[in-house]
Image (spheres, coloured by chain):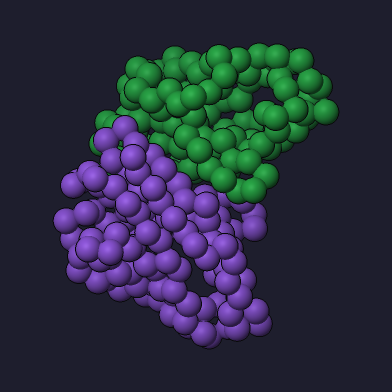
Chain colours: A green, B purple
Amino acid sequence: DTAVSQTPKYLVTQMGNDKSIKCEQNLGHDTMYWYKQDSKKFLKIMFSYNNKELIINETVPNRFSPKSPDKAHLNLHINSLELGDSAVYFCASSQDLGAGRSAQHFGDGTRLSIL
Amino acid sequence: AQKVTQAQTEISVVEKEDVTLDCVYETRDTTYYLFWYKQPPSGELVFLIRRNSFDEQNEISGRYSWNFQKSTSSFNFTITASQVVDSAVYFCAPTGTYKYIFGTGTRLKVLA
């Protein structure tokens, strides 16, 4: 039983396209996150949602738009893809309410490659 | 402002050696939590351990042990009798209310 699942695992697309990454967790957690990991393995939080409400929005271009239809899902839509968007995107969840006290459970990542 | 430092970018050890990974977290917050995550070559991120800022007691769990010293802002993680399967990138990740930071990671290579 996969706790945090994200699809697709690989995404190869042309510059300028629009794409979405989906994430679902079956842990019953209240909080979900999107992280970006660059080629140097540097991990940075992008967004966090708590019970469908946005609680963290780091300095991310507004081409990136998260959507949480319910607390078990947090999708990431990216418009007008650029070369610099190439990275691995991780979805995560935690039972946390934003206090930071709980471990995060991560999906396996989506490797996005922009041609 | 918070700052997390993993000064060791890469460590190589021979199997069965002990290895300690260092992490320094500088913050003015009094309440925070410290996590270590492991990222093996397969790419997934795996939670290893968690401590809070109030608890400086050392702990041991199997081959893992950790030492937190608030006075020096250090949160170190030791693997005893390392194995090849321990080869991975290890991230120190402090958190607080609405704050989630990852260190730059330490790549551990365990050689057979």
Q: Which quarter of the picture shows residue B59?
A: bottom left
Q: Is residue A69 visible?
A: yes
Residue visible at 81% across and 22% down in the picture: A14
B75 on left or right of B39: left
Residue A34, percent from left and from top: 50, 31
Q: Is residue A5 visible?
A: no
B87 on left or right of B22: right
Residue visible at 35% across and 44% down in the picture: B2
Residue B84, percent from left and from top: 60, 75
**Which part of the image, by quadrant, shows the N terminus of chain B?**
top left
Residue visible at 43% across and 23% down in the picture: A57
Q: Nearer the viewer, residue A21 or A28?
A: A21
Above or below: residue B44 compared with residue B56: above
Q: How many marks?
A: 0
Above or below: residue B4 compared with residue A16: below
Q: Nearer the viewer, residue B110 or A70?
A: B110
**Which part of the image, by quadrant, shows the C terminus of chain B?**
bottom right
A51 on left or right of B110: left
Residue visible at 41% across and 43% down in the picture: B101
Q: Which quarter of the picture shows residue A83?
A: top right
B63 on left or right of A97: right
Residue B91, percent from left and from top: 48, 55
